[in-house]
């Protein structure tokens, strides 16, 4: 997986901004329809994860609607209501949500 600033940032608690979930860096978070809620894993790996960097869990202990899934590479990714969370590589600043509806399977997380 190519290093991406969003993917390597230590995870803090996601926040809500303008009615959508954002990472600790203020960038919009997305879910992928092909991930199965509660499965404990992400199906977005390899080139997919290069374009959709996962929100890594770091050492934070999830609570409430948050949980941790194990990625194919062994990394720990934060999930919301059982669905892994991702950034979109083409979002360039907080508030961007250019990945919403991408290929009909990527969606902004609205808590």
Image (cartoon, rainbow, N blue to C red):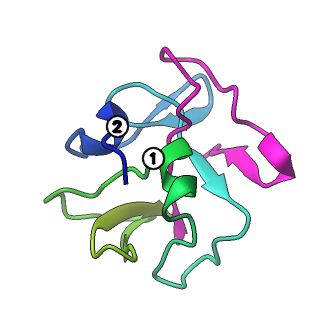
Magenta range? 83-111
Residue 9 drawn at (x, y percent): 24, 38
Front in this rendered view, residue 109 or 91: 91
Tell me, for residue 4, which label it has, or none.
2
In the image, 71: left or right of 41? left
Helix, strand or loop at label 2? It is loop
Label 2 neighbourhood size at 10 Å, few (<14), some (14-19), many (20+)? some
Q: Residues within 10 Å of mark 1 (few under 14, many from 20)?
A: many
Residue 2 in percent (x, y) is at 36, 46
Residue 80 appears in the rendering: yes
Q: Is residue 51 left or right of residue 27?
A: right
State yes or no: discs 2 and 1 in contact (Cβ < 8 Å). Answer: yes
Q: Which residue is mark 1?
A: 53
Residue 86 lies in the magenta stretch = yes
Percent x, y for residue 29?
53, 41
Q: Residue at x 83, y 47 (%)?
A: 103
Q: Quadrant of residue 25?
A: top left
């Amino acid at each position: 997986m190519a290093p991406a600033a969003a993917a390597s940032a230590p995870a803090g608690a996601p926040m809500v901004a303008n009615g959508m979930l954002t990472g600790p860096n203020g960038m919009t978070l997305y879910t992928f329809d092909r991930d199965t809620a509660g499965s404990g894993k992400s199906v977005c790996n390899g080139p997919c994860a290069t374009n959709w960097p996962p929100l890594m869990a770091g050492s934070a202990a999830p609570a409430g609607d948050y949980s941790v899934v194990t990625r194919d590479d062994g990394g720990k990714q934060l999930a919301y209501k059982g669905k892994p969370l991702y950034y979109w590589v083409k979002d360039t600043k907080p508030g961007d949500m250019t990945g919403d509806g991408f290929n009909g399977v990527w969606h902004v997380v609205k808590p």
